[in-house]
Image (cartoon, grey):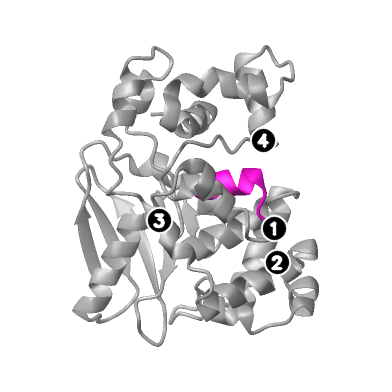
Amino acid sequence: MLITIKTPQNFNFKRTVVSHGWCELLPFEFNKERWSLISVLDVGTKEPVSVEITATKRELRIDANAKTLSQRAVEKIKRDVRHILRLDDDLSEFYALMKDEQNFAWVASTGAGRLLRAPSVFEDLVKTICTTNCSWGLTDKMVSNLVNHLGKKTKDGRRAFPTPEAMAGVSVEFYKDVIRAGYRAPYFKELAERVASGELDVESWLRSELPAKEFLREVKKVKGVGPYAAEHILRMAGRYDGLAIDSWVRPTFAKKHNNGEPCDDKRIAKHYERFGKWQGLALWCDMTQDWIED
C-alpha cells in the first residue's frame, strides 16, 4: 500500500537519513543503493507494519507492507514518518544564522540539520543508553538483541522496537545474559517498569517548556543517563542548547579545527557558543559535513 507525504522545500532526505547512526540500528534498515529507509511502526493493530521510505524532490513515498490499512492506521504512519524525519521542525532561524557564516552556509543551502529519530522518545532513550561507555559494535548488538528477542513481529518477519511493557516483563538476568546489556541491565528493567506503569511519561519531554538546564536535570534522573546522554535526548526532542560531546566528537573536532591536537571540551564549547540555542545542531552539522557529498 503506497502512502505519500509532501515535503518542505528545504528538506534533504539523504542528509536526514544518515544524519547520525540511528539509521544503522534496528528496527531501522538503511539501503544506500536504493536510498531507502525501512522502519517498523506500531499502527494500533495486532501486528506492527514495515514501511519502506523513499523520496523524490517534492514528496516521500511510503510503501507499507500491508494489503489494506484503515484510515486511522494510515494517519498513524504519516504522523510517525513526519516525526522520524522531522518534517514539521522549523529550522528557519537556524538557517538564517548559518547563511551568515562562511563555513556553515552549506547547511542552509543543502537543507541539512534534521536529525533522524525513533517514533518514540522511549526508543530514543533506550538506544541512547546503549551508546554510552561502549563501542558502536556493542551498541548495535544490544539494540539488535532487544528488537529480535522482545519486539512484536510483522507479517514480513521483521520486528518492532519492544514496548515498555515487553521490556518490563523480563528479568534483570535476561538483560544481562540474553541482551548482553552489562551494567545497564537493572537500568533497562527500572526504566521500562516506570514507563509502563505511567510513573514516568518520557513522551511528554517532546512538549516540555522547561529551560534546558531543568530539562537536562529531569532526564538525568533516569538511571544510566549522564550529561552526554541527557544532551543527546535534548537534541532528539528538537532542542539544541546542549553539545552532547562524546568520544567521537572530540577527535573529529581536533582534526578539523585544532590541527589534530587534542583539546578539552571547553575549547569545543567556545567554538560554537556564538550560535546560542542552536549550538548543538551547529556542532553536529559541522562534524558530519563530509558524511555525504551534496
Tell us which disc is closer to us: 1 or 4. 1
Residue 223 in percent (x, y) is at: 68, 61
Q: Secondary structure at mark 1?
A: loop
Tell us which disc is closer to us: 3 or 4. 3
Q: Is residue 190 left or right of residue 195?
A: right
Is residue 232 part of the magenta span, yes or no?
yes
* Magenta segment: 225-233
Callout count: 4
| Residue hosting label 4 | 248
Decide which of tag 3 and tag 4 comes sooner along the chain: 3
Label 3, residues with CA under 10 Å away: few <14, some 14-19, many ≥20: some
Assign the magenta stretch its main secondary structure: helix
Q: Secondary structure at mark 3?
A: helix
Q: Which mark is residue 187?
A: 2
Q: Give the amino acid type for the residue marked by disc 2 in the picture.
A: Tyr
Using the numbered discs, state the Cα–Cα distance from disc 1 to disc 4 in whole angstroms.
19 Å
Q: Give the amino acid type for the residue marked by disc 4 in the picture.
A: Trp
Using the numbered discs, state the Cα–Cα distance from disc 1 to disc 2 in whole angstroms.
6 Å
| Residue hosting label 1 | 224
| Residue hosting label 3 | 206
Q: Are marks 4 and 2 in contact (CB under 8 Å)?
A: no
Which of the 4 image quadrants contains residue 130?
Answer: bottom right
Using the numbered discs, state the Cα–Cα distance from disc 2 to disc 3 in whole angstroms.
22 Å
Q: Give the amino acid type for the residue marked by disc 3 in the picture.
A: Leu
Q: Is residue 233 left or right of residue 110?
A: right
The quadrant of the picture occupied by the C terminus is: top left
